[in-house]
Amino acid sequence: MNVTRHEIIGLGIIAMALLAIPGIANAEVAHARGFAGASINISVGNSPDDANEMHSLIVSNRSLDNLKRSYGDAICTTNGTSIYAGYVEAATSNSTVAAQVSLLENDTAKLQTLAGAANVSGFRSYKDHVYDPQLEKVTNSINNAISAANLSDNQTAYLRQQKQAEERYIANCKSDQDTALKVYADAKVAQYSQIMGFYQNIANMLGGRGMSIANLQDLIGYATNTIVNPLQLAVNSATNATQIKTALGSYCLFDGCANGTNAHLSAKFRIGAIQDEINMLEANSSFSGNSKLAAAQNDLDNATAILNSVGTSVYTGNQLEQINGYIKDAQNNVQSAQHRSMEDDAHENAQATVHEHENESGE
């Protein structure tokens, strides 16, 4: 069956939703952060022979042990939740999920600071009143995104599998925090490889519909060679937790590596898909000089200009919101151009039918 130009509209965006690309348009999956491991020295002078003083010392050490364990549990929860949230956000195209995860990551970093300073009371208070409520917000945003999305049975089953994987990871992580960081890093590498496979599938589908995908192929190659392969090599060659953390903070497929390389793949791929769509439509004479396509091109140019200014750094301020806004406007303008073309075709067909009937009746 041949596909008309009207069926091409929004294929890049629609395909990403249908294939449940596991990735983050708004923020990168959470960075693994290990316990600060600060040296806690309790000065007690001579060996205490007073029972109360000894009891206080034991309680103090126990509190620090609990503090470390509690922080480790928070790390496990944040990392597991962020991996799952990445899959959900890509499947639902809901940027609220990643925004909430980003806030959770910031709260986790604050817990690290408090734990490193052995601030037991401050840690407990922050976890109870800030971190835990934010974790609940993340959970709610994930559930709301899934409920609001029109997911296929395959997408729903896929997300259910990822949720179960998240739960297993968190449970295993909490029971063995010494190896949890490596497990998380391996999961991150596996997720990135899977993401690239999904993007490749989308590019192949668009190519099969008649769109030129050379630019998308270049983008996939760039992300693979700049982010995915170096991350895998760094994780595989790491011999300690510090090296793993450095690797995770150095290569981000989307956004989130404050001191590393960020590919911003989601935004670039969406821009590329819409650009290829515009090029294909403009090659058709019926779209020549279409003002909506011109507006869409202007939107993409504005989004690209912001991306160029960001480079491989993290987004700052409202850059991501601006980019997403321009991409959405471009998509809407392309849809409007297509709709107007369909109306023109319908009008022409109606006129032709009238003339045909007139000729048949001899009028």
Image: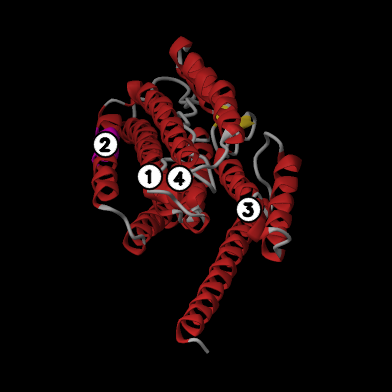
The region drawn magenta spans 164-171
Provide the residue designation for mark 3.
Answer: 284
Compute the Cα span from label 3 to label 4.
Answer: 63 Å
Mark toward the start of the polypeptide (3 vs 4): 4
Q: Residue at x 70, y 63 (%)?
A: 290
Q: Amino acid at mark 3?
A: Asn
- Residue 239 visible? The answer is no
Residue 201 horizontal/vertical position (percent): 42, 35
Residue 28 horizontal/vertical position (percent): 52, 40
Compute the Cα span from label 3 to label 2.
Answer: 47 Å
Q: Secondary structure at mark 2?
A: helix
Provide the residue designation for mark 4.
Answer: 123
Q: Secondary structure at mark 1?
A: loop
Provide the residue designation for mark 1.
Answer: 19
- Residue 204 visible? The answer is yes
Please name which of the two marks, 2 or 4, marks the residue nearer to the observer.
Answer: 2
Task: Indicate which disc residue 165 carries.
Answer: 2
Please name which of the two marks, 2 or 1, marks the residue nearer to the observer.
Answer: 1
Q: Secondary structure at mark 3?
A: loop
Mark toward the start of the polypeptide (2 vs 1): 1
